Amino acid sequence: MPRQDTDDRRILERIDPDLIEHAAEIGLEFLEGFKAVDRIGRPGATIFGSARIDRSNPMYEQARRTGRMFAEEGFAVITGGGPGVMEAANRGARDAGGVSVGFRIKLPHEELENRFLDISVLFEHFYARKTMLVKAAEGFVLFPGGFGTLDELFESLVLIQTGEVQHFPAILFGSDYWNGLLDWIRAQPLEERMISPDDMDLLFVTDDPAEAVETVVECYRRHCAEVPAASAKADAQ
Protein backbone atom coordinates (compact mmCIF):
# COMPACT_ATOMS: atom_id res chain seq x y z
CA MET A 1 0.00 0.00 0.00
CA PRO A 2 1.47 3.43 -0.89
CA ARG A 3 2.54 5.57 2.01
CA GLN A 4 0.20 8.49 2.66
CA ASP A 5 1.71 11.90 3.28
CA THR A 6 0.62 13.90 6.30
CA ASP A 7 0.97 17.62 6.88
CA ASP A 8 3.66 16.99 9.50
CA ARG A 9 5.65 14.81 7.09
CA ARG A 10 5.59 17.47 4.40
CA ILE A 11 6.51 20.26 6.82
CA LEU A 12 9.37 18.26 8.33
CA GLU A 13 11.07 17.87 4.99
CA ARG A 14 14.27 19.92 5.00
CA ILE A 15 13.12 22.04 2.07
CA ASP A 16 9.56 23.39 2.31
CA PRO A 17 8.30 25.12 -0.85
CA ASP A 18 5.15 26.29 0.98
CA LEU A 19 6.84 27.72 4.05
CA ILE A 20 4.60 30.76 4.57
CA GLU A 21 1.39 28.81 3.98
CA HIS A 22 2.40 26.05 6.37
CA ALA A 23 3.45 28.52 9.07
CA ALA A 24 0.06 30.22 8.82
CA GLU A 25 -1.76 26.88 9.06
CA ILE A 26 0.19 25.94 12.19
CA GLY A 27 -0.58 29.31 13.74
CA LEU A 28 -4.31 28.90 13.13
CA GLU A 29 -4.24 25.41 14.59
CA PHE A 30 -2.60 26.68 17.76
CA LEU A 31 -5.21 29.43 17.99
CA GLU A 32 -8.09 26.95 17.71
CA GLY A 33 -6.45 24.80 20.36
CA PHE A 34 -6.00 27.74 22.75
CA LYS A 35 -9.66 28.67 22.29
CA ALA A 36 -10.70 25.11 23.12
CA VAL A 37 -8.58 25.11 26.29
CA ASP A 38 -10.24 28.38 27.34
CA ARG A 39 -13.67 26.76 26.91
CA ILE A 40 -12.85 24.04 29.45
CA GLY A 41 -13.39 26.52 32.26
CA ARG A 42 -11.98 24.43 35.11
CA PRO A 43 -8.80 22.61 36.17
CA GLY A 44 -8.03 19.50 34.16
CA ALA A 45 -6.15 16.22 34.25
CA THR A 46 -4.74 14.70 31.07
CA ILE A 47 -4.94 10.92 30.86
CA PHE A 48 -2.73 9.01 28.42
CA GLY A 49 -2.69 5.35 27.48
CA SER A 50 -3.03 2.83 24.71
CA ALA A 51 -5.78 2.96 22.10
CA ARG A 52 -5.45 -0.85 21.87
CA ILE A 53 -6.92 -1.58 25.29
CA ASP A 54 -10.47 -2.86 24.81
CA ARG A 55 -13.36 -2.99 27.23
CA SER A 56 -12.44 -6.49 28.41
CA ASN A 57 -9.05 -5.30 29.67
CA PRO A 58 -9.01 -4.48 33.43
CA MET A 59 -7.19 -1.22 32.63
CA TYR A 60 -10.24 0.02 30.74
CA GLU A 61 -12.34 -0.03 33.91
CA GLN A 62 -9.51 1.49 35.94
CA ALA A 63 -9.22 4.37 33.48
CA ARG A 64 -12.98 4.82 33.53
CA ARG A 65 -12.97 4.99 37.34
CA THR A 66 -10.12 7.48 37.24
CA GLY A 67 -11.98 9.71 34.80
CA ARG A 68 -15.13 9.54 36.90
CA MET A 69 -13.27 10.43 40.10
CA PHE A 70 -11.59 13.43 38.48
CA ALA A 71 -14.99 14.67 37.30
CA GLU A 72 -16.42 14.24 40.80
CA GLU A 73 -13.62 16.49 42.06
CA GLY A 74 -14.59 19.17 39.55
CA PHE A 75 -11.75 18.45 37.13
CA ALA A 76 -12.10 18.19 33.37
CA VAL A 77 -10.73 14.99 31.85
CA ILE A 78 -8.54 15.52 28.79
CA THR A 79 -7.38 12.75 26.46
CA GLY A 80 -6.31 12.21 22.89
CA GLY A 81 -9.96 11.57 22.08
CA GLY A 82 -9.53 8.08 20.65
CA PRO A 83 -10.48 4.55 21.75
CA GLY A 84 -9.00 2.39 24.50
CA VAL A 85 -7.78 4.16 27.62
CA MET A 86 -8.83 7.49 26.13
CA GLU A 87 -12.40 6.37 25.62
CA ALA A 88 -12.54 4.87 29.10
CA ALA A 89 -11.35 8.05 30.80
CA ASN A 90 -13.69 10.28 28.78
CA ARG A 91 -16.53 7.86 29.48
CA GLY A 92 -15.85 8.04 33.20
CA ALA A 93 -15.99 11.83 33.11
CA ARG A 94 -19.30 11.64 31.24
CA ASP A 95 -20.64 9.13 33.81
CA ALA A 96 -20.14 11.74 36.52
CA GLY A 97 -21.54 14.65 34.51
CA GLY A 98 -18.12 16.25 34.16
CA VAL A 99 -16.36 17.96 31.26
CA SER A 100 -14.81 15.49 28.82
CA VAL A 101 -12.25 16.76 26.31
CA GLY A 102 -10.56 15.11 23.33
CA PHE A 103 -7.62 16.60 21.46
CA ARG A 104 -7.44 14.26 18.49
CA ILE A 105 -4.86 13.84 15.72
CA LYS A 106 -5.56 13.29 12.04
CA LEU A 107 -3.67 10.25 10.79
CA PRO A 108 -4.13 7.76 7.95
CA HIS A 109 -6.35 4.87 9.09
CA GLU A 110 -6.80 6.47 12.53
CA GLU A 111 -9.84 5.37 14.50
CA LEU A 112 -12.76 7.78 14.87
CA GLU A 113 -13.16 9.86 17.99
CA ASN A 114 -14.80 8.21 20.94
CA ARG A 115 -18.40 9.21 21.62
CA PHE A 116 -17.92 10.58 25.13
CA LEU A 117 -16.54 14.04 24.29
CA ASP A 118 -18.02 17.42 25.18
CA ILE A 119 -15.15 19.38 23.59
CA SER A 120 -13.38 17.88 20.59
CA VAL A 121 -10.64 19.35 18.39
CA LEU A 122 -9.02 17.57 15.46
CA PHE A 123 -5.37 18.54 14.91
CA GLU A 124 -3.24 18.12 11.81
CA HIS A 125 0.05 18.59 13.69
CA PHE A 126 1.33 16.57 16.62
CA TYR A 127 3.14 19.46 18.27
CA ALA A 128 0.01 21.65 18.36
CA ARG A 129 -2.00 18.82 19.83
CA LYS A 130 0.67 17.97 22.42
CA THR A 131 0.81 21.59 23.51
CA MET A 132 -2.91 21.55 24.32
CA LEU A 133 -2.65 18.26 26.21
CA VAL A 134 -0.10 19.96 28.47
CA LYS A 135 -1.66 23.43 28.58
CA ALA A 136 -5.03 22.16 29.80
CA ALA A 137 -3.62 19.96 32.59
CA GLU A 138 -2.87 20.25 36.29
CA GLY A 139 -1.40 16.75 36.21
CA PHE A 140 -0.87 13.69 34.03
CA VAL A 141 -1.95 10.10 34.57
CA LEU A 142 -0.24 7.64 32.23
CA PHE A 143 -1.80 4.23 31.81
CA PRO A 144 0.01 1.43 29.96
CA GLY A 145 0.69 2.38 26.37
CA GLY A 146 3.11 2.28 23.48
CA PHE A 147 5.51 4.74 21.89
CA GLY A 148 2.96 7.58 21.97
CA THR A 149 2.44 7.22 25.70
CA LEU A 150 6.18 6.91 26.32
CA ASP A 151 6.75 10.02 24.25
CA GLU A 152 4.26 11.96 26.38
CA LEU A 153 5.87 10.64 29.56
CA PHE A 154 9.40 11.71 28.75
CA GLU A 155 8.39 14.99 27.16
CA SER A 156 6.39 15.91 30.25
CA LEU A 157 9.32 15.01 32.51
CA VAL A 158 11.70 17.19 30.50
CA LEU A 159 9.26 20.12 30.55
CA ILE A 160 8.83 19.82 34.32
CA GLN A 161 12.53 19.19 34.98
CA THR A 162 13.61 22.26 33.04
CA GLY A 163 10.92 24.55 34.45
CA GLU A 164 9.21 25.04 31.09
CA VAL A 165 5.90 24.02 32.67
CA GLN A 166 4.67 23.99 36.24
CA HIS A 167 5.85 21.23 38.52
CA PHE A 168 2.71 19.10 38.43
CA PRO A 169 2.41 15.35 39.10
CA ALA A 170 3.12 12.71 36.45
CA ILE A 171 1.52 9.49 37.66
CA LEU A 172 2.29 6.07 36.21
CA PHE A 173 -0.73 3.82 36.60
CA GLY A 174 -0.01 0.10 36.76
CA SER A 175 3.08 -0.87 38.73
CA ASP A 176 3.59 -4.18 36.91
CA TYR A 177 3.76 -2.34 33.60
CA TRP A 178 6.02 0.55 34.66
CA ASN A 179 8.37 -0.91 37.28
CA GLY A 180 10.76 -2.39 34.73
CA LEU A 181 11.22 1.01 33.13
CA LEU A 182 11.80 2.64 36.51
CA ASP A 183 14.36 -0.02 37.42
CA TRP A 184 16.25 0.77 34.20
CA ILE A 185 16.13 4.52 34.88
CA ARG A 186 17.61 3.94 38.34
CA ALA A 187 20.25 1.49 37.08
CA GLN A 188 21.35 3.50 34.04
CA PRO A 189 20.57 7.24 33.77
CA LEU A 190 20.55 7.77 37.56
CA GLU A 191 23.56 5.55 38.28
CA GLU A 192 25.50 7.23 35.46
CA ARG A 193 24.48 10.67 36.76
CA MET A 194 22.64 11.54 33.58
CA ILE A 195 19.78 12.66 35.82
CA SER A 196 19.67 13.87 39.41
CA PRO A 197 18.22 11.89 42.35
CA ASP A 198 15.56 14.59 42.71
CA ASP A 199 14.37 13.83 39.19
CA MET A 200 13.00 10.50 40.39
CA ASP A 201 10.62 12.49 42.60
CA LEU A 202 8.84 13.69 39.46
CA LEU A 203 7.24 10.25 39.08
CA PHE A 204 4.52 8.60 41.12
CA VAL A 205 3.46 4.97 40.66
CA THR A 206 0.10 3.60 41.74
CA ASP A 207 -2.46 0.89 41.08
CA ASP A 208 -5.28 2.83 42.76
CA PRO A 209 -7.47 5.33 40.86
CA ALA A 210 -8.29 7.15 44.11
CA GLU A 211 -4.60 7.67 44.87
CA ALA A 212 -3.91 8.91 41.35
CA VAL A 213 -6.74 11.43 41.54
CA GLU A 214 -5.92 12.54 45.07
CA THR A 215 -2.26 13.18 44.16
CA VAL A 216 -3.25 15.56 41.36
CA VAL A 217 -6.09 17.23 43.25
CA GLU A 218 -4.04 17.80 46.41
CA CYS A 219 -1.19 19.29 44.42
CA TYR A 220 -3.64 21.66 42.77
CA ARG A 221 -5.18 22.66 46.11
CA ARG A 222 -1.78 23.23 47.75
CA HIS A 223 -0.46 25.12 44.69
CA CYS A 224 2.54 22.78 44.66
CA ALA A 225 2.74 23.10 40.88
CA GLU A 226 3.66 26.77 41.26
CA VAL A 227 7.07 25.76 42.63
CA PRO A 228 9.34 25.27 39.59
CA ALA A 229 11.47 22.19 39.25
CA ALA A 230 14.87 22.72 40.85
CA SER A 231 16.94 20.80 38.32
CA ALA A 232 19.10 22.81 35.97
CA LYS A 233 18.35 22.68 32.28
CA ALA A 234 21.67 20.97 31.71
CA ASP A 235 20.33 17.93 33.56
CA ALA A 236 17.98 17.26 30.66
CA GLN A 237 20.82 16.64 28.22
Image: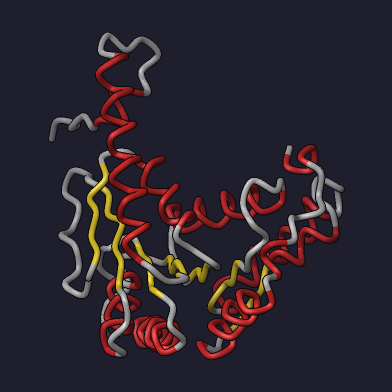
**Residue 62: x, y in percent?**
42, 86
- Residue lying at 43% horizontally and 83% vertically, measured from the top left: 74
Quadrant of res 17: top left
In the rendered view, does 198 fall on the left or right side of 68? right
**Residue 19: x, y in percent?**
31, 14
**Residue 46: x, y in percent?**
45, 66
- Residue lying at 71% horizontally and 46% vertically, measured from the top left: 162
Number of marks in picture: 0
In the rendered view, does 147 fall on the left or right side of 104? right
Residue 65 to residue 203: above or below: below
Residue 168 to residue 237: above or below: below
Residue 233 to residue 57: above or below: above
- Residue lying at 74% horizontally and 61% vertically, measured from the top left: 227
**Residue 128: x, y in percent?**
38, 42
Colour theme? secondary structure
Quadrant of res 2: top left
In the rendered view, does 97 fall on the left or right side of 74? left
The residue closer to the viewer here, 84 or 228, is: 228
Residue 61 to residue 227: above or below: below
Quarter placement of the N terminus = top left
Quarter placement of the C terminus = top right
In the rendered view, does 115 fall on the left or right side of 178? left
- Residue lying at 64% horizontally and 57% vertically, measured from the top left: 166
